[in-house]
Image (cartoon, rainbow, N blue to C red):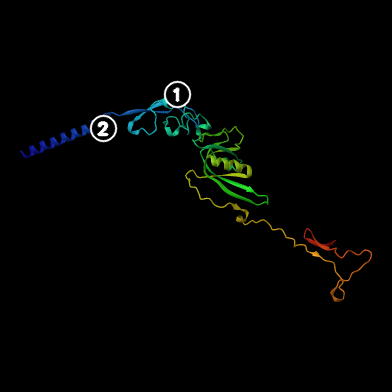
Amino acid sequence: MQRHRVLVAFGIAWLTALAVNWWVFKKSTTPQSRDVVFAVAALKDLPAGKRLQASELKLVGLDRNDLPKGSFAKASEVVDRAVAVPLVAGELVLNGKLAATGSGEGLPALIEPGMRAVSVQVNEVSGVSGFIQPGTRVDVLFTRVFSNGDAATTTLLQNTKVIAYGRQFDPGARPDPRDVSKPTVATLLVSQEEAEKLVLAGQRGRIQLALRNALDDSVAEPFDPVRSADLGIEEPKKPVAPPVRPVLPPTDMGAGGSRASTTGKGDKSKDSKQVLVRVYRGEKLTEEAVQ
C-alpha cells in the first residue's frame, strides 16, 4: 500500500513537470503582438547639403519603444529639406540631421542661423598638409610682421568648425584620385564679429590653421602675443653715434684776459665757428673739421 502511494505521487509530479515545460515552450514560441510604427529612412547614401526627394526615402517599421525622438512618420514632412550631415542607406532621418526648412541646399544649408561662412587662403603648410577636412575643428593663428622687421603671433580664433575645404563640404566623400588640383581655401563657420577679424587678419598678415582633436572642445584664456624675444631671438642693436659738439677755433688771449685781434689776408671773422664732424664708414670712424 505504501509503495502504491509513492508511485502515484511520482506520477503526479512527473505529469506536472511535463505540463509546466509544455506551457513554457508554448509561451516562448508563440509570436507576441508588437506595437509597430513606421518612420522615414534614407533609401540610399545621401551626402551633406543634399536636398531630399521622395524617391530617396522609404518607410521602415520598428517597435514604438525603439522610435527615436525627432523621427518622421511621413516622407512628405522632410521633402525639400537639406541634409546637414551625411546619411547612409537605411538610416533614420531625424530632425537634428536636417537643415532648417527653406535654407536651400549645398553649402548655404550648412550655415547655422546667426553664423557666417568665411573662406581663408591655405596651402600645404597653413592647411596642415591637407589633413583639414570638412567637419574638423581648428584654431586660427595670426602672424604680423612689423615695419622694424620684428613679428608677433597670436591665436585669433579657437575651436572653429571647418564646413568646406575647397569645394568639398561632405566629410565622408573621398577625393577623386584623378583630380590633381589642391584646395586653396578653407571655409570656416564663424560669428559676425569673428568674420570681421578674419577678413582684417588676411589683409594685415598671414593666417595659419592648427588642427584640433575632435574630442577637444576646450577654449583657453586670451594671452599675450608671442614675439621674437620670447623665442630668444632679439633684434640686433645698431651702434649709436655720440652727439656732435661744435669746436671753437683757438684764440690768443692778451694781457688781462682780453682776446687779441688779428688782421690779415685769409683770416676769418672772430664770429666764425669750426664744427667737428664724425663720419662712420663701416666700422671705421674719421673726424673732419668743417667751417
- Name of the residue lying farthest toward the left: 1
**Which residue is nearer to you in this view: 178 or 136?**
136
Judged by depth in the image, the label closer to the viewer, 2 or 1, is 1
Image side of residue 175 versus residue 43, left or right: right
Q: CA distance from mark 2 to mark 1?
A: 40 Å
How many C-alpha atoms fall within 10 Å of the one at disc 1: few (<14), some, or many (≥20)? some
- Where does residue 222 sit, x and y in percent of width and height? 53, 50
Circle 2: element type: helix
- Determine whether label 2 and label 1 are within 8 Å by CB: no
- Give the quarter of the image for residue 118: top right
Residue 120: where, in percent of width, then height?
Answer: 59, 39
Closer-to-camera residue (171/209): 209
> Residue 69: image x %, image y %?
38, 34
**N-terminal of the two: label 2 or label 1?**
2
Above-or-below relation of 272 to 149 = below
Residue flagged by tag 2: what amino acid is it?
Answer: Ser
Disc 1 is placed on an element classified as helix
Q: Residue furthest right?
A: 265
Q: Quadrant of the N terminus?
A: top left
Outermost residue toward the bottom? 255
Residue at x 42%, y 24% (from the top left corner): 76
Where's residue 148, x and y in %? 68, 52
164 or 220, which lies in front? 220
Question: Which residue sits at x=33%, y=33%?
Answer: 65
Residue occupying image coordinates x 33% and y 28%: 36
Disc 2: which residue:
28
On residue 276, the disc is none
Please, is residue 84 above or below residue 271 in the view? above
Identify residue for label 1: 54
Q: Amino acid at mark 1?
A: Ala
Q: Is residue 67 above or below residue 285?
A: above
